[in-house]
Amino acid sequence: MKEICFVTGNRNKLTEVKKLLSNYKVLSLSDINFFQDIPETEKTLQGNAFLKAKAIHKKYKLNCFSDDTGLFIKALDGKPGVKSARFAGENCNSEDNINLVLKKLKDIKNREAYFLTVICLIFENRKYFFEGKVSGQITNEKIGDQGFGYDPIFKPYGYDKTYSEFTIKEKNIFSHRALAVNKLINFLTNLK
């Protein structure tokens, strides 16, 4: 089985992606003994995804991929966007980020938003990008106890529940990350 490294420190993302990318042995950063932080200093999701993949590829010469995901809220001029993980500050957690979004959207009727995931794959010294986007709306309160990040306040269009009310298996059918990863899988499958 071929190996590929997923450049992420997020255990939840790793779990989701390993279930989707079953034809490869997906290595984590700890599997390759990499324990440093790779700062996301770019102004776009694409830039951050490339930055992280490039750092690992350069150091270990491994085929690898990285993602960056953002929640873009129309009423907040696209924020938190590329700063989604640190929306409430550098040392914040998901709870802080959710609370800040709900506070900023208090009394705002237009709650349109979308999640966008961009994956950068570096495979045999060439780079490729894959995207997945899901539109929906922000709820008035947290609902559900599955998932992570902004999942408890994001309700995708066409569904009557938040991401946090779906199991990982259900979410992996249609989520923004699943859409991007499925494009990655199709690409890797067609390389054979």
Image (cartoon, rainbow, N blue to C red):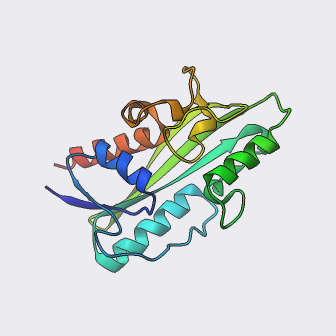
Residue 176 placement (x, y as % from top left): 49, 39
Outermost residue toward the bottom in this view: 59
Quadrant including the N terminus: bottom left
Relative horizontal placement of residue 150, taking residue 55 as reference (left or right): right
Residue 63: x %, y % from top left: 28, 64
Q: Is residue 178 left or right of residue 187?
A: right
Q: Nearer the viewer, residue 61 or 33?
A: 33
**The quarter of the displayed image where residue 174 is located:** top left
Above or below, 30 against 190 in this view is: below
**Left or right: where does residue 90 sit relative to residue 123?**
right
Q: Is residue 152 above or below residue 52?
A: above
Horizontal placement of 165 versus 77: left or right? left
- For the point 36% across and 77% down, the residue is 58
Quarter location, residue 59:
bottom left
Is residue 88 shown above or below 105?
Answer: below
Q: Residue at x 69, y 53 (%)?
A: 96
Front one among 151 and 135 = 151
Residue at the far right in the pictured view: 107
View extreme (front): residue: 145
- Toward the viewer: 140 or 55? 140
68 vs 188, nearest the viewer: 68
- Residue 10 location, x and y as percent? 45, 58
Q: Residue at x 56, y 25 (%)?
A: 161
Residue at the image point whose x is 42% and y is 70% from the top: 54
Residue 23: percent from the left, percent from the top?
Answer: 20, 47
Quick check: can you spot residue 134? yes
